[in-house]
Image: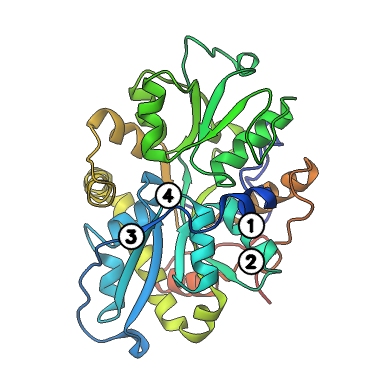
Amino acid sequence: MSAPTARSGSRRRTLTALAGAAVFPLLLTACGYGSEASDEAKAPKAEGEKVGGLDEVKVGFFANVTHATPLVGFGGEGLIQKELGGTQAKPYLFNAGPSAIEALNSGSIDMTWIGPSPAINGYTKAAGKNLRVVAGATSGGASLVVDPEKIKSEADLKGKRIATPQPGNTQDVALLNYLNEKGHKVDPETGKGDVSVIRQDNKEIPTTFQQGDLDGAWVPEPTASNVVDKGGKVLIDERDLWDDGKFVTTHLIVSQKFLKEHPEVVEAVVRGSVKTNAWINDNPGKAREQVNAGLEKHGGKKLPKSVIDPAFRNIEVTDDPLASTLDEQARNAVNSGLLDKAEIKGIYDLSILNKVLKAEGRPAVEDAGLGAK
């Protein structure tokens, strides 16, 4: 996709207060970073010369369709590990972003694919000293899916039980901010209020919905399509809240310490990511199969065609981190009172990505004025 200017393609429709990147600091403190981190995933095989002489790099990602880049890049085609050669990539799985941020802050991982909300909150809380966004991954792939017998419009949300994956994750904050914009009062810490916000693991939500204990869920793919497969109906597709249908869902962040000490390793991962994204876009059918194989490997269950097909269609794989949308999400978060501040100046370092893109004969992407100096 072509690179947007700092402000192009970043205007909301009428629901401008839906800040997918807004995060309540108290939510993340309450949930406890790292509480949802899974065991180390099975590592891909390292072969050849070590990049910069480094033995290993610890990377995080989620077993979500919105994390197609690492699922294919470390499985399937294995293009990310190929770029790392003999430097072993050690993958770690997370359920949602807040836990991944703690792992990054503690040094348990060096980099991770993650959503915008935890990245903004983590960067703000660390006074801009912990991470950099170095590449994009996906846009889209998040929806509010509801029981059509109980909820036919926004007016029916009051008194209902709506799930999100984790307190303070991107979809949790998107729901809370949407409800706030619509005048529904909800305590962001407890989830209690005019609408009950239920925090539950992605893999549990479809079953809980089918059992009738949830009236809906604001979730990423493939959970959204899984809930639809269980009888749900999409009430809000987040793509419809943006004029061009594009907004950052997943991007790659790196600890500043690791970026400074091992830029050549970061470049190898970014180069592998760019090659992986190109392969995914050139081979959508095979890519969908490899994503599903990755979900089976890391999540324990392969998705049926009725779930994986729409889930994969609902995302756009992109190298562009869509910086202008992150900027607008953060500002909307402050304007709606969800954050006291959102200090994201310097959150991007796209120099490595643009170096890789230039070598591929492709145009540079923009950082919306939020790049590191």
Q: Is residue 131 visible?
A: yes
Q: Secondary structure at mark 2?
A: loop
User: 10 Å neighbourhood of mark 2: few (<14), some, or many (≥20)?
Assistant: many
Picture layout, residue 216 above or below residue 65: above
Distance between mark 3 and mark 2 Cα atoms = 28 Å
Lower position in the chain sequence, tag 1 or tag 3: 3
Please name the amino acid that badge 3 sits on. Answer: Asp
User: Toward the viewer: 365 or 18?
Assistant: 18
Cβ atoms under marks 2 and 1 closer than 8 Å: yes
Q: Position of residue 227 (x, y in %)?
A: 39, 27
Q: Give the answer, above or below, for where 371 lies relative to 63.
A: below
Q: Is residue 183 above or below residue 150?
A: below
In the depicted structure, whether residue 210 falls above or below residue 142: above
Q: CA distance from mark 2 to mark 1?
A: 8 Å
Residue with the mark numbered 1: 120
Estimate the x, y position of residue 188 in percent, counting from the top left.
67, 39
User: What is the number of the mark on residue 347?
Assistant: 2
Q: Nearer the viewer, mark 2 or mark 4?
A: 4
Tell me the quarter of the picture where residue 56 sits.
bottom left
Crowd tier of the residue under label 4, counting other residues whose Cα lies within 10 Å: few below 14, some 14–19, many 20 or above = many
For marks 2 and 1, the one nearer the N-term is: 1
Residue 39, label in figure:
3
* Element at label 4: loop
Identify which residue is drawn at 72% across, 45% down: 333
Q: Which residue is mark 4?
A: 95
Q: Nearer the viewer, residue 192 or 327?
A: 192
The answer to whether marks 3 and 2 mark residues whose Cβ atoms lie closer than 8 Å is no
3 or 2: tag closer to the N-terminus = 3
Q: How many residues crowd around disc 1 within 10 Å: few (fewer than 14), some, or many (20 or more)? A: many
Of the residues under marks 1 and 4, which one precedes in the sequence?
4
Q: Secondary structure at mark 3?
A: strand
Question: Residue at 36% across / 62% down in the picture?
Answer: 92
